[in-house]
Structures are given as C-alpha cells and as structure tokens.
Image (tube, rainbow, N blue to C red):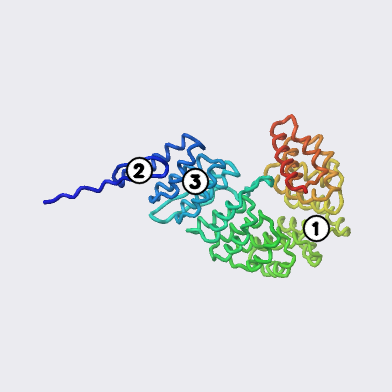
Amino acid sequence: MRTTLPLLLVVTFSCGFTLAQGPTVDTKQRAKNVREMVKQGPDAVPRIAPYIKDPDLSVRIEAVKALVEIGGPKTLDPLVAATGDNDPEIQIRATDGLVNVYLPGYSKTGMSGTLQRVGTSIKGKFTDTNDKVIDAFIQVRPDVIESLGKLARGGASIESRANAARAVGVLRGRAAVPDLIEALHSKDDVVMYEALIALQKIRDPSAAPRISFLLRDLDDRIQIAALETNGILRNKDAAPDVRDALAHARNIKVHRAALGALAMLGDPADHASFMHDLNDKDDALRAAAAEGLGRLKNPADRTVLDKAFTDEHKMNARLADAFALVNLGNLDSSEFSPLRYLVNTLNIRSYRDFASAYLTELARDQAVRAAIYPMLTRATKDEKIQMSIVLARSGDKDSVPYLQTLSTDPDGDVAQEGIRSLRSLQARLP
C-alpha cells in the first residue's frame, strides 16, 4: 500500500526570511515571530507591516495587535491598510490603534479590549464614557479620517461600524461628516447613536439639516441624541420639529431633551415655554428653562431668574440660573454672585462638566472674560486647570497672557494644562 507524505511548504516573505515547515506549524511560527518583534519597538514596524496581508487571519490579528501595542506615528500606514481588511476584529483593532496614535491610552479603553470571537461572529462593547476628543491643535492625517469614514458607513459588522463612527468623533474628523450622515441611515441603533455623538463633537453646522429626520425616531435613545445634536449644532430651522417632539414627548427623558434643544436654539417664540417650566417640579426641566431664558437675553426676565437662583436647591438647576444671569449681564464676581458660583463649582467633580460648559459659552463674550481674569489670581488648582480649558475653547487674543501665566504656574499640573490650552487657543486664532 502506498503512503502519501504531507506536503512540505516553503514560504518566502518580503520581510526577509524563509520558513520550511508544515502549514499549521508555519502559521503558528509566523504569529510567534510577530509577537517577538514587538519587543523591538518602533524599529520593528516595517518588518511587522507585511503580516497585515498574511493569508491567515490569526496572523493578521497578531500583526494588528502588535502595531497597536507599539504605537506611534510609524504604525499609521499599516494600520490604515488594516482597516481595509474584511474581518471585523481587525477593523476594530486597527481603528482603536489609529485613535491611540493621536490620543495615547485610547486602545486600553476602546472596544478592542472587550472583543469576543465565536466562530466568524465578533462581539464587543464600549467600556468608556463617550466624551473623549483630541486637542484642537492636533492635526490628523487625512487618510486616517478617510479610512475611518469608510468603516463607519460600510464596515464588516455593526460593531466595527459603530466603533469607527466613535473614532471619527474623537478625532474631530470633519471630512468624514458625509460618511456619518450615511451611517445614520443604517437602520442600526448602535451605529446611528455613535454617528450622532460624533457629529456633536465635530460641530459642523452644515450637518444639522441632514439629521432632522431623526427628531421623530421611535427609539428614545436615538430621538434624544438627535434632539441634543440639533441643539448643539444650533439648527434653528428644526425648531418646529423640536416643538412637535416636546408636545408629543413619550416620556420625561424626551421632554427634557426637547426643551433642552429649544433652550440651545434660543428662539423668542419659546419664551412662554421656558417661563412655564422654570417652576416645574422636575429640576432638569427647570435647568433647561433657565438656559433658554438666558440665551434669549431679555432684561425683563432678570427678576424672575434672580429669584430662581436664590430659591433653587438643586445644583444643576441653580447652575443654569447662574448661567442665565451672567448671560443677562450680571458680571459681579463677589462671593455669592452667579459668576463666582459657576467658577467655584469647578472644584466639585460631579458638577464640574456642567459649570465648565456654561463658562465655555459665556467666555465667548469679551466682557465675561474680563470679569473672569482677575479671579485667576486667587483661583484654586482645579479652577485654574478648568479655566485654562475654558479659555482654550472660547478665549481670544486677550486670553493669551493669562494662559502664558498659567503655563508657568508653580503647580506642575496647572502648568501642563496651561501649556496645552495655550497651544489649543493659538491653533484657533487667525
């Protein structure tokens, strides 16, 4: 009887070595070689890159994992190439790796850390809050945004598409806005939600008219995100649809989002709604109503807002009252003033984001900035750090000397944020 011996394969790679082993051993050895090359750091990237096109999936996965672990600008080209792979796990890992180059540490909290593979099925979930975004002075290569945009609209799985949409938002990928708009038509709630949040981060007003169709979405999470996005993008043309959503709100969450969106739009036609809800039993509605009155800047409303600020016991609503009063021209910075209340709240971790958001909007007004500057002299560490961020986002040329001072603060954390904020501001200035 004749015996047939297994075929011995000889495979030569462009990375400069030859293996003469059986198919199974050959695959394992290639994967092992990739893992070992990680120890060599960035210098190994050119030798790992060819494995991105390896015929075996497990080897390609190891190659992407290696590139992400090494990190740095040298990995951009092979990771961009890896986004073109048809495997969802590779797409997800490559996406997180690309973001990690511009936002170090991202890959440890991204979706790739939760991936589970069962056969050809890949499942993953987001483990971090969706608030990360790169500094304004960071420039992202156009081909990175292009590749992520393609994944957002047509990745190999729902997870890879949602993950790419989130990545576009983190990287402020304005060029991928059309891809995000297309993703909104995907019929998948996870992808749609991530695309909406990404549009909020990018803040391109031109996108607003193309998301109005979601203001009546039957899924609460999508409708609420769409309402918030239209408000953030200040889509005044959507005001009638937002009012309709308010009138037909299915629950208190939608009601809050609709009133909040109207508050962002600041249309005098909604004055009566704001006045009515300023006394609502729900503190979130009271907060939204106060915001709306503040943006209308009607001097006649100052008396009622003064009373609301004095009588309010819920912190989120009282912060909104303070915002409204400062927006109406109360620039007093004494101990119990609305402006001082906003600045002092920067010391409270659980409400810091609210106060920072209000101050960011208020600081676009030079008169408000002029009232804030003297407060920096005796500010706490947290106040200095947060006000640096506020001035980076909303300051002007008059803010430069103050950020320069903060950048040389004796406290290292304050100085570090001062330097970063100064760079962000200078990147915005003409």
* Number of numbered tags placed on the structure image: 3
Q: Residue furthest top?
A: 410
Residue 319, x across and y down, in percent: 76, 49
Residue found 53% across the figure and 41% down from its top = 71
Q: Which mark is first along the chain, 1 or 2?
A: 2
Q: Residues within 10 Å of mark 2 (few under 14, many from 20)?
A: few
Single out the mark in the foreground, 3 or 1. Answer: 3
Residue 63, x across and y down, in percent: 45, 45
Single out the mark in the foreground, 2 or 3. Answer: 2
Residue 92, x across and y down, in percent: 50, 51
The correct choice, above or below, for 268 with respect to 404 in the image is below
Secondary structure beneath dot 2 equals helix
* Disc 2 to disc 3, C-alpha distance: 23 Å
Q: Which mark is first along the chain, 3 or 2?
A: 2
Residue 160 visible? The answer is: yes
Residue 167 visible? The answer is: no
Q: Residue furthest left?
A: 1
The correct choice, above or below, for 200 with respect to 101 in the image is below
User: What numbered label is drawn on residue 113?
Assistant: 3
* Disc 2 to disc 1, C-alpha distance: 63 Å
Secondary structure beneath dot 3 equals helix
User: What numbered label is drawn on residue 295?
Assistant: 1
Residue found 73% across the figure and 70% down from its top = 240
Which is more toward the observer, 215 or 325? 215
Q: Residues within 10 Å of mark 1 (few under 14, many from 20)?
A: some
Single out the mark in the foreground, 2 or 1. Answer: 2
User: What numbered label is drawn on residue 28?
Assistant: 2
